Amino acid sequence: MKLFKNLLQMSLPSVLLLSMTLISPMIAMTATENYWEVRAIDTMKYSRDRARESSIVSEIPKIVTAAADLNPTHIAIGTPYDSEFNRVNQSWAREIHRRKINVWFRGNFSGWEGWFDYEELSSPEDHHTKTYQFITSNPDFFRDGDIFTPAPEPENGLIGDPRFGNKEAYYTFLRTSYQTCVDAFEAIDKDVTCGYFGTNGDIAKDILTPELVADLGNVIIIDHYVKDADIFAKDIDFLANKFPNAKIIIGEFGAPVPDIHGSMTNQEQASIIDDFLKVMYVKQAIVTGVNYWVLNEGTTAIVTDNLEPKLAYDVLYKYYNPQVITGIVRDTLDDPISKATINFSDDHRSIQTDSQGRFTASIPADSVEIEIIQDNYFPGKQVLTLDNSTEIVEVNLTPKKPTFLYKVRLLLKSILSGFPRS
């Protein structure tokens, strides 16, 4: 009998002798990461538009709480960088950092676009000088992991839209602004990501070049509002083809924008936002970050004026807090099956098992059907109902053409399963 046991276990990796309770923690260690490295929620309608109001500082904790409950990696603020607003910037940064969340600084100097009746800046060089001074004079505003954008949508300001003006001036501004930001954070020894200059989709498609993008950290940020998810998907694919080596981050998206979407009920808003998010989720190999615009106030807000969540808030929460599926695919002898394809019915996405037959995926859904395919085996299917915890999946596939040795081992396994364990 001992000989039979040795024969049965011949060529079985020892890892398969572990129970699933031992295997699953090993898988889950890599499964808890979200598919987007940046998951942000924007507060611009409050953090910029109300930056001069005397009550703003006292309101910040409530706004941050509503944003933090989404579990974002970053909360984006649009507070201007002028010294007048230092107290407000500091208050936002302290409250966000206190929640162990990073800040995405998406403000600018008021003179760039004429906010708050500021006089227009004298030149792009003036902007660079002020940026360096703002960063180096306020090191306590920043924490490692933050993002700093010197000029969101820079085409709206002093240098103008490059589609109708001097493209070279636009390129020069972006390169110098990016390097100025990098130099400033090196001077204060903070690991803050620079750049993330959002542009509208047309400028990204028609004006940006691979060489320019490489000089700006190899990241493309688009602030993109379109009618439906099909257009959204095509635009992302266009950028991915034009800039195959760059990360794509959606710097702004949201609905409804009245001129584009018309008016919408809460249900219609939730539905279209879900459509947009599903596009970015399916294209997670291309889209590495998302910033929803905006949290509150404005037509795209996902909370009410009293900060009560709308249906769209729950949709965003689902994508920012995905459920984790981990599992292992084996044959009927419990040998692992590598390079088996796992197809997900909810989004037509596929992943493959590793050399030990293991797989892991993050799913923004309450339930999902998976199909497991490998050329040499009959396919298998499972419907999974997810319950806010890591789902453990074990699948055994039957070979289409089992070898003689496989049949012998299967027979021995069946015989031995009837014997009591020693």
Image: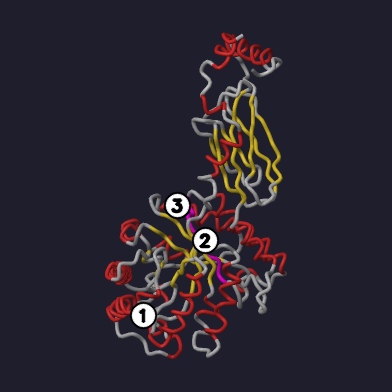
- How far is mark 3 from mark 1, CA to CA? 29 Å
Determine which quarter of the picture holds residue 60.
Answer: bottom right
Q: Quadrant of the C terminus?
A: top right
Q: Which residue is mark 2?
A: 39
Nearer-N-terminus badge (3/1): 1
Indicate left or right for 412 with 104 as reference: right
Residue 379 x/y as whole percent: 65, 28
- Secondary element under disc 1, as helix, strand or loop, is loop
Which amino acid, by three-letter code, is at mark 3?
A: Ala
Identity of the residue drawn at 68% across and 63% down: 270
Which residue bears the numbered disc 3?
240
Please report the residue visible at 61 percent of the width from the left and 71 percent of the height from the top. 66
Determine whether the residue tagged by mark 3 lies in a helix, strand or loop: helix
Q: How is the image coloured?
A: secondary structure
Disc 3 to disc 1: CB gap under 8 Å = no
Sequence order check, earlier mark of 1 and 2: 2
User: What segment is highlighted magenta in the picture?
Assistant: 286-294
